[in-house]
Amino acid sequence: MKLINSNRITSCKHLLLTYILLFLAPLSHAAVSWETINANIQFLKQEDKLRFYDSNQVLIEGKKCALLVDASGNFAGVERLVNDLKKRLKTPLCYLVATHYHDDHLLGMAVMQHFYPDAKLIVHQRVNDNFSVYQKAFTNQLDNYEKSIELSYQRLANIAKEDQPQWREKLELAKKRLFRWREYQLNAPQIAINKSKTLDLGGFELTLNAHAAHTNGDLTISTNGGSVLIGGDAVDWLPYPGHGELKSWQALLKQYINDSKLSLIIPGHGGTLNRAQLKQPLLFLTAITEHVKNNKGQTVEKLMLSFPESVMKPYTEETLNKKSSDLFLQAGLIRAKNTK
């Protein structure tokens, strides 16, 4: 166990205060960027420095209906998205799709459901079966926000007096937002998918497919005759394997790599990809399972030290990639060791 000195603790507390205020405060630079894929699809790309902490969204619109894929875990960000949609949508928002159950894809749906109560929430059958767990997670997240705000008030005394008024003002804004968010509810899905389902948005069809990959309940969306794939975190260039169904995930990536019709891939995190770029996450996941298989009995710490450098090299060329890939590798090795 590593010892942490008191100065480090104070620093961490200040960082926590800063994080809470920044997360809840309106930051113009934190807005997603809108990228046009084609006449029917808008890619809402998360700010680059947040790409491993919060999700992308995708808006698909036909002549009669619109569909939104995923909702950010930043509720203030989702409220900004609602304002954008009010200006941009030409048709009713009929569907909300959560590609899986992780907080940064599902919990923000409570905000969307509040403003678009007629939109049907679509999830994987496994997510639907355990939905009360995620409803509790939404409530817990709000409770955690409240505790963080209370702690931040207590720590105001440690901030320079001349800076306290601006921090207090931000905390008051955070309280108002939390009070508003308490009115939202994560309502049960109306559509659960265990295989596939095709929807017609009005002259534009898409097919939702169920998988066990990044989690045991992933949804992907195929459009434009199979040339465009909205794959959620199952197709991330740097994949998080901590909850993954690793073998079936590898098989799915191989399927996409060999699909000659597929030309553009929209992941849950990061920018768009092509089929060839999926070889890197496949290599990463395959190396994790093989490394654990070939080194039975080794601790996770030893497995990390002996993990092939060639696999990790593409992830070490940028600081955020390096930091995240180390954490993701650790989670993947633990997952592989615990998978029978």
Image (tube, grey):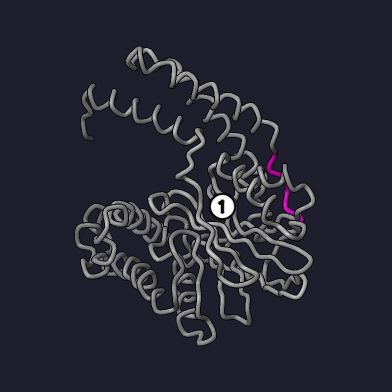
- Residue sitting nearer the eye, 88 or 298: 88
Classify 10 Å Cα crowding around label 1: few (below 14), some (14-19), many (20 and above): many
- Of the 4 image quadrants, the one containing the N terminus is top left
Which quadrant of the figure has residue 228?
bottom right
The stretch drawn in magenta includes residue 220: no
Q: Residue at x 44, y 52 (%)?
A: 47
Q: Which secondary structure type mostly characterizes the magenta part of the structure?
A: loop
Q: Residue at x 32, y 15 (%)?
A: 160
The stretch drawn in magenta includes residue 188: yes
The picture places residue 204, in percent across and down from the top left corner, at 72, 74
The picture places residue 16, in percent across and down from the top left corner, at 38, 30
Q: Which residue is mark 1?
A: 105
Q: Residue at x 61, y 39 (%)?
A: 138
The picture places residue 193, in percent across and down from the top left corner, at 69, 65
What's the residue type where badge 1 is placed? His
Magenta part of the chain: 185-190
* Left/right of residue 29 with respect to residue 116 in the rendered view: left
User: Height in image: 137 above or below 160?
Assistant: below
User: Height in image: 300 above or below 310?
Assistant: above
Q: Residue at x 63, y 50 (%)?
A: 84
User: Height in image: 113 above or below 34?
Assistant: above
Under tag 1, what secondary structure?
helix
